[in-house]
Amino acid sequence: MTDDDFKKKFWKHLDDSPFVMLAISGNDHSHSQPMTAQFDDDFPNDLYFFTSSHNGFVKAAQAGERDAVVSFSSKGHDFFASVHGLITIDNDEAKIDKFWSPMVAAWFEEGRDDPQVTLIRVDLGRAEFWEAGTGSFMKEMASAIFNKSAHEQGRKHQRETRFAA
């Protein structure tokens, strides 16, 4: 499979279940937090997240701690991703309007006009994808167990790539 094949699978699986774990990396207070990713073909190398202006991701970005990691597991647990990028506050009104939904509104007492509404963007960079599940992967892994080549077989279903140069 090519880099583009893995990226297409990532977007397809993320569209099915847009829930990820987002973390700021490289600081003593880092932790992962579940977030709902917003994305669109108009922004092919970015993920967006609504949060409160008091959230740790916002405070980290304001302090210059921008290195982020997005961890993803597909709904069927047959596709996984770890994507590194840079987090930025992006309160562009047009983007907020584009991604706003009743599900997002439920998190803010004053809805769209809540002063705490903050849109953060992760500019996607280095990514690693893993594909698992049924079919050829399972057959190859069963064969690999007997032939002691599981690592080699597993690498056929794994790819490290970049979203943006």
Image (cartoon, helix red, strand yellow):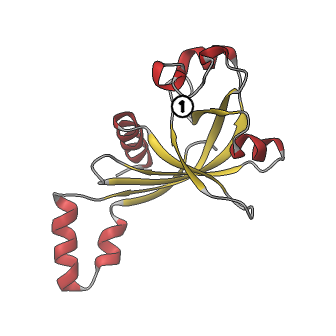
Task: Residue 61: name its quadrant.
Answer: top right
Q: Position of residue 146 (x, y in %)?
A: 17, 84
Q: Position of residue 137 (x, y in %)?
A: 22, 62
Residue at 67% x, 19% y: name it.
114
Residue at 61% x, 16% y: name it.
112
Q: Nearer the viewer, residue 45 or 5?
A: 45
Helix, strand or loop at mark 1: loop
Which residue is situated farthest in the right direction here? Answer: 63
As drawn, 37 above or below 21: above
Q: Position of residue 150 (x, y in %)?
A: 29, 77
Q: Nearer the viewer, residue 58 or 90?
A: 58
Residue at 32% x, 69% y: name it.
154
The residue singled out by tag 1 in the image is 44
As drawn, 42 above or below 153: above
Q: Residues within 10 Å of mark 1 (few under 14, many from 20)?
A: few
Residue at 65% x, 51% y: name it.
68
Q: Position of residue 165 (x, y in %)?
A: 64, 44
Task: Residue 48: name its quadrant.
Answer: top right
